[in-house]
Amino acid sequence: MHRCRTLWLVYFSFLVGCNSASISGTVPVAGKVTYKGSPVEGAIITFIPEGDGRIATATTAAGGAFSLMTVDAAGALPGKYKVTVEKVEFAAGGSSSMEAASTGNASEGKLKRLLPSKYAQATSTPLMMEVPTGGKKDLDFALAD
């Protein structure tokens, strides 16, 4: 009986430990991304906080729709953010692995940006957003060349 209780304690501790990374205080943030008037599906959108905060990310779905996540919590923390948007594809015959892309190995294929590169880096993006304490569900990022 003591052994069974010990196993339950270990199991319960594991469950509590898994939830310790939850972020409280996030608010819903959602919207859509378009490029030249057309919705962008499969782009990665990243909210990078100015100062202290946590990065929030999403991948755009059909119609360019996105809904941010911070670690394992829906939404983003209120505050000011720089926003990056990136969509890439790999040239024919190339590998689609992120590992191959990060090494830049020419034999693995070439990476092609499908959106202007200015949106891909925090240092060059013109997109900025302040997430209010009540959240924001109707963002519209209209990208252009």
Image (cartoon, helix red, strand yellow):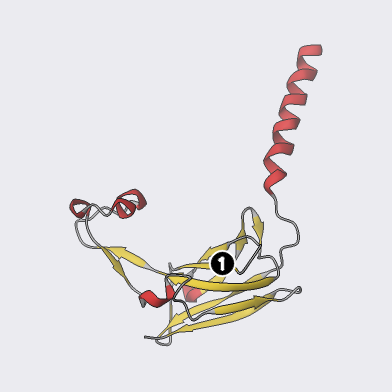
In the rendered image of this protein, does residue 117 appear above or below residue 68? Answer: below
Label 1 amino acid?
Ile
Q: Quadrant of residue 50?
A: bottom right
Q: Could you tell me residue 92's position as x and y percent?
A: 20, 61
Quarter of the image for the C terminus: give it: bottom left
Left or right, 92 with respect to 140, comes to left
Residue 91 seen = yes
Q: Which residue position is annotated with label 1?
A: 48
Front one among 41 and 122: 122
Left or right, 75 with respect to 118, comes to right
Quarter of the image for the N terminus: give it: top right
Residue at the location (61% across, 61% down)? Answer: 69
User: How would you rate the neighbour count of disc 1 (Cα within 10 Å): few for under 14, some for 14-19, many for 20 or more?
Assistant: many
Q: Could you tell me residue 90's position as x and y percent?
A: 27, 61
Q: Quadrant of residue 16?
A: top right
Q: Could you tell me residue 47's position as x and y percent?
A: 56, 68
Residue at the location (68% across, 47% down)? Answer: 21
Left or right, 11 with respect to 43, comes to right
Q: Quadrant of residue 81?
A: bottom right
| Tag 1 secondary structure | strand
Q: Could you tell me residue 119's position as x and y percent?
A: 43, 75
Residue 1 seen = no
